[in-house]
Image (spheres, rainbow, N blue to C red):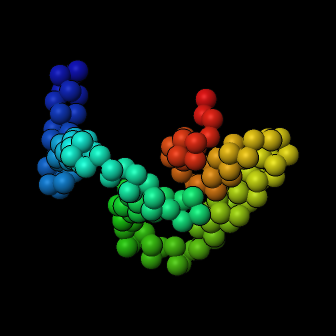
């Protein structure tokens, strides 16, 4: 019985792997290549980090913003058109989600940060945390603003 289950699981994995595109199949290699390219460029052109670091608007790094956009954009493309059409027929759940994620949660986060925290950078990190429906990047954002992360 266990052999049958293991065989089915293996077949499912193979089917999923066949469904992946060229880019997805080689994602670990792409990541390693991008890391190698970054290390290579910083060794060949030592001033590149200072140059890129100077591209800021009011202390916000433009290259980091662009890279974050390209990291998050593909995840948003996984929406299926048929699912979006269903939202038009019954918009209440999506409206409630949008209001809670983008209005209520940030206001609560701002209020709690101002009431209970004194460190300006930590307050900013908490506001980012509460403003984001996906909190996976919050520690990175806290690090990027040079905040103290535990």
Residue 87, horizontal then vertical, whole percent: 52, 73
Q: Quadrant of the C terminus?
A: top right
- Residue in front for this viewpoint, 67 or 15: 67
Question: In the rendered image of this protein, does residue 96 appear above or below residue 27?
Answer: below
Residue at horizontal 52 percent and vertical 78 percent from the top: 88
Residue at horizontal 20 percent and vertical 27 percent from the top: 6
- Residue in front for this viewpoint, 144 or 130: 144
Residue 71, horizontal then vertical, whole percent: 38, 56
Q: Quadrant of the N terminus?
A: top left
Residue at horizontal 50 percent and vertical 62 percent from the top: 56
Relative placement, left or right, of 99 versus 74 is: right
Residue at horizontal 29 percent and vertical 46 percent from the top: 46
Residue 103, horizontal then vertical, whole percent: 71, 64
- Residue in front for this viewpoint, 3 or 99: 99
Question: In the rendered image of this protein, does residue 95 appear above or below residue 89?
Answer: above
Furthest-right residue in view? 115
Residue 15, horizontal then vertical, whole percent: 16, 46
Quadrant for residue 28, please give it: top left
Relative placement, left or right, of 125 versus 112 is: left
Is residue 64 in view from this perspective?
Answer: no
Is residue 10 in view from this perspective?
Answer: yes
């Amino acid at each position: 019985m266990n052999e049958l289950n293991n065989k089915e699981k293996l077949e499912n994995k193979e089917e999923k792997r066949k469904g992946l595109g060229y880019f997805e199949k080689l994602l670990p290699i792409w990541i390693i290549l991008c890391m190698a390219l970054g290390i290579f460029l910083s060794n060949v052109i030592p001033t590149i980090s200072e140059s890129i670091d100077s591209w800021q608007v009011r202390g916000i790094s433009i290259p980091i913003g662009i890279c974050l956009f390209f990291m998050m954009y593909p995840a948003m493309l996984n929406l299926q058109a048929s699912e979006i059409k269903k939202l038009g027929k019954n918009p209440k759940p999506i409206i409630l989600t949008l209001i809670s994620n983008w209005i209520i949660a940030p206001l609560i986060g701002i209020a709690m940060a101002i009431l209970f925290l004194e460190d300006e950078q930590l307050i900013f990190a908490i506001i980012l945390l509460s403003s984001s429906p996906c909190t996976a990047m919050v520690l990175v954002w806290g690090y990027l603003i040079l905040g103290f992360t535990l």
